[in-house]
Amino acid sequence: MKDYGALLKKYHLKATPQRIYMINEIEKKGHINIDDLYESLKKSFPYISLATVYKNINAMVENGFLSEVKIPKMKTKYELTKNEHAHLICTKCGALEDIFIDTQCIKDDIIQKSGYTIEKTLIKIEGICPKCR
């Protein structure tokens, strides 16, 4: 098991049992929305409120510990911040999967065409997953 307490402290966040549980659950699921996370948390912390979950998620996003994955027509999902990657989204079942691709050629092309300085690359690719095909 990873030392989530030390990881939280690295991001200037207090290591509470609830936060450690959240991180473990997010890592286990890969991507999770707040409602599903809340339902899971209630099993171990029956008195936790949905507002507390939102507050903790927002603090972890603001500090760069978690990343939001916004998908049209779906609830926002959260993931541990990782190296740049793209998201594959199934248009039938809504499955969400990480795919690590080299985005440098895309960045170079955009820089050349636009003159922008690229700070972050967010790529979402939609299709039909193998289970739904």
Image (tube, rainbow, N blue to C red):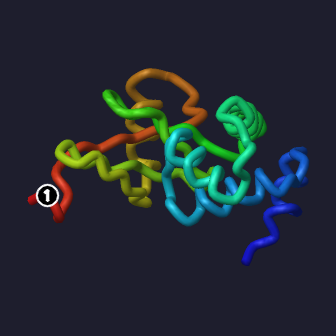
Residue 26 or residue 70, whichever sits in front: 26
Secondary structure of the residue carrying tag 1 is loop
Residue at 83%, 54% (x, y): give it. 8
Residue 101 visible in the picture: no
Q: Position of residue 15 (x, y in %)?
A: 88, 54
Amino acid carrying mark 1 in the image: Cys
Q: Quadrant of the N terminus?
A: bottom right
Q: Position of residue 44 (x, y in %)?
A: 69, 59
Above or below, 1 relative to 121: below
Residue at 90%, 53% (x, y): give it. 9
Q: Is residue 118 left or right of residue 54?
A: left
Q: Position of residue 66 (x, y in %)?
A: 65, 45
Q: Quadrant of the C terminus?
A: bottom left
Q: Position of residue 37 (x, y in %)?
A: 57, 48
Q: Quadrant of residue 49?
A: top right
Which residue position holds label 1?
132
Residue 98 or residue 101, whichever sits in front: 98
Residue at 49%, 22% (x, y): give it. 115
Q: Quadrant of residue 114?
A: top left
Q: Is residue 50 left or right of residue 100?
A: right
Residue with the most extreme bottom position? 1
Q: Is residue 31 left or right of residue 67?
A: left
